Image: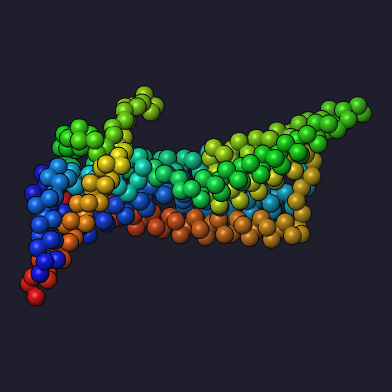
C-alpha cells in the first residue's frame, strides 16, 4: 500500500500502545498457558491427595511440570505471537525480581540436593535410591527451568508448585488435604482467572490489529 | 502569539525522513517494543512487503533502526530494532507535531 496522508499523532500512539501490549505476550503474559497450568495444579494435587499411589502411578507425576513448560511456551510462541515475534526489554525491577527468585531457588535446590546426596547409601533399597535420585533431579532442575522459561509471577508459582509436587510424589510422599489444599487450589484458581483475563485482552488486541490492517 | 510562532516554526524543523507517512508508521510500531519481527510490522502498519523493505532500508541508513536477519526452523526471519537516535527522532517529531497542532487550534480561536 502507499500511504498518502500523514497519520494523526493519536494513530501513532495507538500503534505504539498495540505493539507494547502485544509484546507482553512474548514473556509477561501466559493467557491460556496459565489456565492450563492452573488446571494441572489443581488436578495433580487432587490425584496426589485423594488417590492411592503405587510405584507406577507416581512416575506419571514427572509429566505435569514438563507438560506445563512445553504447553505454556507453545501458547506463547505459536498462538500469542502469531502476528510475528515482538519482544519488550526487561525493566530493572523485573530483572531484579527474576534474578532474586532464581538465586533463592538455586540455593534451596543446592541445600536440599546436598542433604539428599549425603544421606547414607548403605542399607537403602534400589527403589529408595531411585526415589531420592528423582527427588534431587527435580529440585536441582527447577531453578534452571525457572531462569529460562518462567518469567511472570503466576508462571513462577504454578511452575514451582508443579515441580514440588513432582519431586515429593516421586520421592514417595504426597501432599495431603491440609493447608496445601488451599495453596494448590488457591494458586491454581488464581492462575486460571488471570490467564482467562489475559486471553480476553489478547482477543481484543487481535481485533485491534486486524482493524489496523483494514484501516489502511 | 510568540508561542504560536514557535509552534509553527517547529513545523519547518520537522525531520523529513520521519515525516514520510510509511516511515512514521514503522517508527511508531517499533517505538512500542525492543525487537519486532518484519511480519508484525507488516500487519500493524498495513504496508506491503516491498514498501516496508524500502522504507526500513532508508531508516536503517539514517541510523534510526537496526535490521537483524536470522534463521528459525530453517526459515529466514527479519527483525527490526529502533535505535536510540530513532526513538529520539520519533519522540521529537511527535512533540513538534503536537505543538504545531496546538498552535493552529489557538490561532483559530
Residue A180, quarter of picture: bottom right
Q: Quadrant of the N terminus of chain A?
A: top left
Q: At x 66% / y 55%, what residue is drawn?
A: A184
Q: At x 16% / y 54%, what residue is drawn?
A: A7
Q: At x 69% / y 45%, what residue is drawn?
A: A164
Vertical placement of residue B92 versus A114, above or below? below
Vertical placement of residue B98 versus B42, above or below? below
Q: At x 22% / y 59%, what residue is drawn?
A: A10
Count up the numbered dots: 0
Residue B86, quarter of picture: top left
Judge left or right: residue B108 versus residue A64: left
Vertical placement of residue A175 versus A127, above or below? below
* Residue A112: percent from left, percent from top: 76, 39
Judge left or right: residue A36 versus residue B76: right
Judge left or right: residue A31 versus residue A127: left
* Residue A104: percent from left, percent from top: 66, 44
Res B41 visible: no
* Residue A113: percent from left, percent from top: 75, 35
Residue B77, quarter of picture: top left
Judge left or right: residue A201 versus residue A156: left
Res B36 visible: yes
Query: Which one is in front, A66 or B84?
Result: B84
Amino acid at each position: 500500500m502507499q500511504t498518502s496522508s500523514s497519520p494523526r499523532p493519536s494513530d501513532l500512539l495507538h500503534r505504539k500502545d498495540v505493539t507494547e501490549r502485544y509484546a507482553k505476550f512474548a514473556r509477561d503474559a501466559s493467557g491460556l498457558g496459565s489456565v492450563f497450568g492452573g488446571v494441572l495444579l489443581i488436578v495433580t494435587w487432587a490425584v496426589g491427595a485423594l488417590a492411592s499411589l503405587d510405584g507406577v502411578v507416581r512416575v506419571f507425576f514427572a509429566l505435569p511440570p514438563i507438560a506445563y513448560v512445553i504447553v505454556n511456551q507453545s501458547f506463547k510462541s505459536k498462538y500469542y505471537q502469531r502476528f510475528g515475534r515482538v519482544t519488550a526489554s526487561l525493566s530493572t525491577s523485573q530483572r531484579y525480581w527474576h534474578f532474586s527468585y532464581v538465586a533463592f531457588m538455586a540455593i534451596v535446590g543446592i541445600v536440599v540436593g546436598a542433604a539428599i546426596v549425603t544421606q547414607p547409601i548403605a542399607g537403602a533399597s534400589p527403589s529408595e535410591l531411585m526415589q531420592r535420585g528423582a527427588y534431587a533431579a527435580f529440585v536441582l532442575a527447577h531453578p534452571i527451568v525457572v531462569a529460562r522459561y518462567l518469567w511472570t509471577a503466576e508462571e513462577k508459582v504454578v511452575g514451582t508448585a508443579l515441580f514440588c509436587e513432582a519431586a515429593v510424589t516421586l520421592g514417595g510422599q504426597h501432599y495431603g488435604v491440609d493447608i496445601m489444599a488451599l495453596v494448590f487450589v488457591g494458586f491454581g484458581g488464581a492462575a486460571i482467572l488471570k490467564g482467562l483475563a489475559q486471553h480476553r485482552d489478547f482477543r481484543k488486541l487481535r481485533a485491534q490489529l486486524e482493524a489496523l490492517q483494514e484501516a489502511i | 502569539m510568540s508561542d504560536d510562532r514557535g509552534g509553527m516554526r517547529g513545523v519547518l524543523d520537522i525531520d523529513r525522513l520521519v515525516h514520510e507517512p510509511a516511515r512514521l508508521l514503522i517508527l511508531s510500531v517499533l517505538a512500542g517494543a525492543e525487537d519486532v519481527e518484519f511480519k508484525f510490522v507488516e500487519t500493524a502498519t498495513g504496508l506491503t512487503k516491498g514498501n516496508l523493505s524500502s522504507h526500513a532500508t532508508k531508516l536503517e541508513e539514517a541510523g534510526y533502526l537496526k535490521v537483524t536477519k536470522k534463521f528459525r526452523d530453517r526459515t529466514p526471519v527479519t527483525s527490526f530494532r529502533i535505535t536510540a537516535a530513532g526513538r529520539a527522532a520519533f519522540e521529537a517529531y511527535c512533540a513538534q507535531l503536537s505543538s504545531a497542532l496546538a498552535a493552529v487550534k489557538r490561532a483559530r480561536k
